[in-house]
Amino acid sequence: GGGRGGRSLSKHKADAAPPTRTPMMEFGFENLPFSDVMERCTQSLHTLDAVVNLLRSRASAEDRYAKALSEVTYAGPSLMRAFLGSPRGEAQDDNATLHASLEAAKAASHAEGETRARFAANLEALAGRLAEMRAAHDKLVTHKGAEGKALIRNVKAAARQVAKASERLDRARAAEAKAKAKDARDGDGDVSERQRRKNAEALVAASRGVDEAEDEMRDSNNTLIMARQARQDGLSAIATTLQHSEEDRLGVIADA
């Protein structure tokens, strides 16, 4: 797609990283029927749920690992010292070297534990951000979906009115043709002046009915044209809004 659909969503990744844009992002919503747009949005929400669950599972695993490192960091050297005791002479020198190694291992383990804990916190924060975006996108999809359905309903209602107006126009023209035929027959025959006036009045009424039906047909056609234009413009705007929301969330996932 053009516009914002063309921007890279993996700008913080290495050039060799696989593309993160979905097929939807490649050609944009504008090439999809509205029902497909909504289906893509629903699928996108399911995908986001899976990403959030994955991040939270990873965060939980990292947090457990950090806690396990903390326990080993403080319990391991103490147990080793208790096991070695307080030897004398050369053994004491050897144990001093061992104790120094244990302290170094303790420091490294402590640093690793802190790193893992920060990573877990960052993952949880990212999952929270995506969950908030998911909730906002869900609300947006529901709202815009209702707008789109209303636009589609308006076109269908306008089309039904055109069909009804067309039927009324056909009936009016048939009535006019019938009135003309009767007026012509009676005009050539031996009928009373009163009947002639009735025929003329019926013909005028039938012609007026045709004019009114034609006006109604014209108005209903104009309404349908405007409804179709509103649907086209409205669905395009809705699709663009939904696509931008999708791009924003994909950008956050890509940067994760």
Image: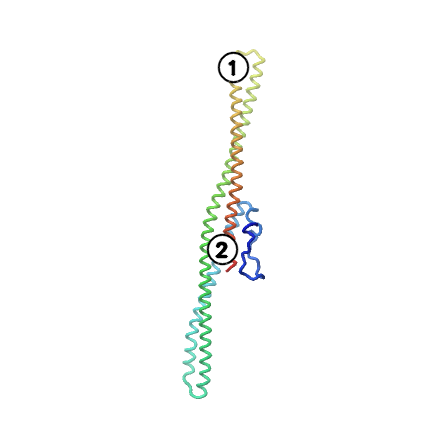
Query: Is residue 31 positioned above or below 167 on the image?
Result: below
For residue 231, the mark is none
Q: What secondary structure is found at the residue carrying circle 2? A: helix
Q: What secondary structure is found at the residue carrying circle 1? A: helix
Tell me what residue is drawn at x 52 percent, y 28 percent.
Answer: 215
Query: Is residue 49 positioned above or below 191 on the image?
Result: below
Tell me what residue is drawn at x 51 percent, y 18 percent.
Answer: 201
Q: Are there few (<14), some (14-19), or many (20+) residues within 10 Å of tag 1?
A: few
Query: Is residue 90 positioned above or below 172 on the image?
Result: below
What's the residue type where badge 1 is placed? Arg
- Which of 221 and 16 lies nearest the eye of the viewer? 16
What's the residue type where badge 2 is placed? Leu
| Residue that numbered label 1 is attached to | 197
Residue 220: percent from left, percent from top: 52, 32
CB-based contact (under 8 Å), mark 2 and mark 1? no
Residue 208: percent from left, percent from top: 52, 23
Tell me what residue is drawn at x 43 percent, y 82 percent.
Answer: 84
Comes first in the chain, label 2 or label 1: 2
Image position of 88 (left or right of 16)? left
For residue 48, the mark is 2
Residue 196: percent from left, percent from top: 53, 14
- Which of 173 and 239 lies nearest the eye of the viewer? 239
